[in-house]
Structure formats: structure tokens, C-alpha cells
Amino acid sequence: MNRLLASALSLTLLAGCSLREPMPANQGDVPTLTPRTSTYHDLLALPRPSGRLVAAVYGFRDQSGQYKPNPASSFSTAVTQGAASMLVDAMQASGWFIVLERESLQNVLTERKIIRASQNKPEVAANIADDLPSLRAANILLEGAIIGYDTNVRTGGQGARYLGIGASQEYRVDQVTVNLRAVDVRSSQVLANVMTSKTIYSIARSASVFKYIEYKELLEAEAGYTTNEPAQLCVLSAIEAAVAHLVAQGVERHLWTVAAGQDLTQTSLPRYLDPPPMPPMPALAAD
């Protein structure tokens, strides 16, 4: 019995070690930059524009209507509420936009009032002595929202058990969808409009042992872990892809142009252009 107990414990420990995800040393102690996906590198690899677009973002709301399931919270939303900040970051990374601050415009106006009040004093600081220039106006507005968050789009798993020793794996797929559009400020015409989706993966792996050792004694052990893809990173990736598609759509429709002298095949732009139409099939000769 001792040998059976030892072998069962050894199998459980081996299964647990194989399933246990390694924890990097001091990973939770040191702040790091947000990891970026391939869509971010695609933004960096876009061709240079002939002239950057002056754009403003007033907000990027959550219109999914989804909340975290109970008992987590009845008021905590399933997706991030900071999508506007993500959009500004993606626009600047693309190199195609001059982004104007509009979400916190009231803070900018308040600070300008403080500067003007300070200029009336006899000892004014040198950095605020000159008159304030007018605020810059935008040519286009980037509007949009997180329009969908669907849970359990696809679920599944697999497992096996033999003589009380088994292992299993389960997965779940969620999906987030965002909409982004460019609006001409002077005419309010929607110039370009795109929708992108990103899947969110959750995986659970476990191993277990259930053995009778002797009368009224049994052995039961279980090990496992769960990995959830961060939802905010998936929202960020979907927004970055939307910006890249928006730039590509504008180039395709001749709304804005790339700088001359660039080899577009060496950029990420062709991946976001619509594929060219297939040539028509030749007509068959009549008998």
C-alpha cells in the first residue's frame, strides 16, 4: 500500500508541475510597460502620411451594456471605461494624427484662466508672460464606441481518466467588438467607418487522483490553474486594428494620402487594404 500511495502522490505532483504555470521572479513587484500585441507594431509600421490629420476625440463610450456576472458586482462593467485613452494612444502610435485634447477640455480651459489671472500680477513668471494663443481646431472627429461584448461565444474541453488518475482542459471564448468612424467637422459627413472584433480566451487545466488505499481510507488530490486573457488588452488591440483599418480605408478612398517615395510593400498598409477584385472568368465558347 505504501508503494501505491507513493506512486499516486508522485503522479499527482508530476501532473501538478506540468500544469503549473511558472511565475517569473518578482513579476508582481516591479511595474512594467503594458505588453503590446501585433496590432501595435502594425501601427508603427504604417507608411508616413503626406500630412498629419488634426483630429479630436471627445470620448469612446462603452455601449455593450454588459456587466460582470454575479457575485462579482452588479455595477462593475465587463469592459474597460478607458477606451478613449486607448484610442488616443493608438492614434499617436500610428503617426497619422495630431491629437487634440477634448475629453478633459474643461481642465485645459480652467488652466488657461489661471494663466490669464496670473498675467495681471506685477511679478509674472517668464513662462506665462506671453499672451496665450488660440486653441487649435480639429479637421476631423474620431467617434465610436465599444458596441459589443459577447461571452461564451465558444466553449469546449477535453479530458481523460484511467484508474482514478486523470487530467482535463477546458476553454471559453469571449468576443469584444468596437466601432470607429472619422467625421468631417465642417460638413458632419462620415468619411470612413470600420468595425473590428477581438476574441478573448480563457483556459483552465487540471489534474486529479482518486485512489482507494485500504478499507475506509482513500487518497484524493487535485492540481490546476486558469489563464484569462486580459479583456482590456483585447479592447486595446481591437482599437489599434480599427485605427489601422481607418487609415487604410482613407488611403483607398483618396481621403488622405501617403508621402511620396515609399515602398508600401515594406509597410503594414497592404494587410489592411481590401483585397483587389478577382479578374472576371473568361466566357466559354459557344458550341
Image (cartoon, rainbow, N blue to C red):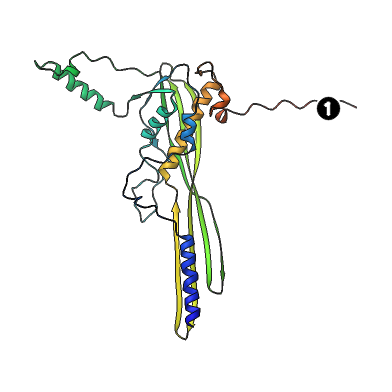
Q: Residue at x 21, y 21 (%)?
A: 112
Tell me: 133 left or right of 78. Answer: left
Q: Nearer the viewer, residue 45 or 157?
A: 45
Question: Does the image show residue 65?
Answer: no
Q: Residue at x 47, y 81 (%)?
A: 2
Q: Residue at x 45, y 74 (%)?
A: 220
Identify the secondary structure beneath mark 1: loop
Residue 217: % across, % down: 44, 82
Res 143 → quadrant: top left
Amino acid type of disc 1? Leu
Residue farthest toward the bottom in the current orientation of the protein: 215
Q: Nearer the viewer, residue 130 or 30?
A: 30
How packed mark 1 is, by other alpha carbons closer than 10 Å (few <14, some 14-19, many 20 or more), is: few
Q: Residue at x 48, y 63 (%)?
A: 206
Residue 224: % across, % down: 45, 62
Residue highlighted by disc 1: 284
Residue 153: % across, % down: 52, 49
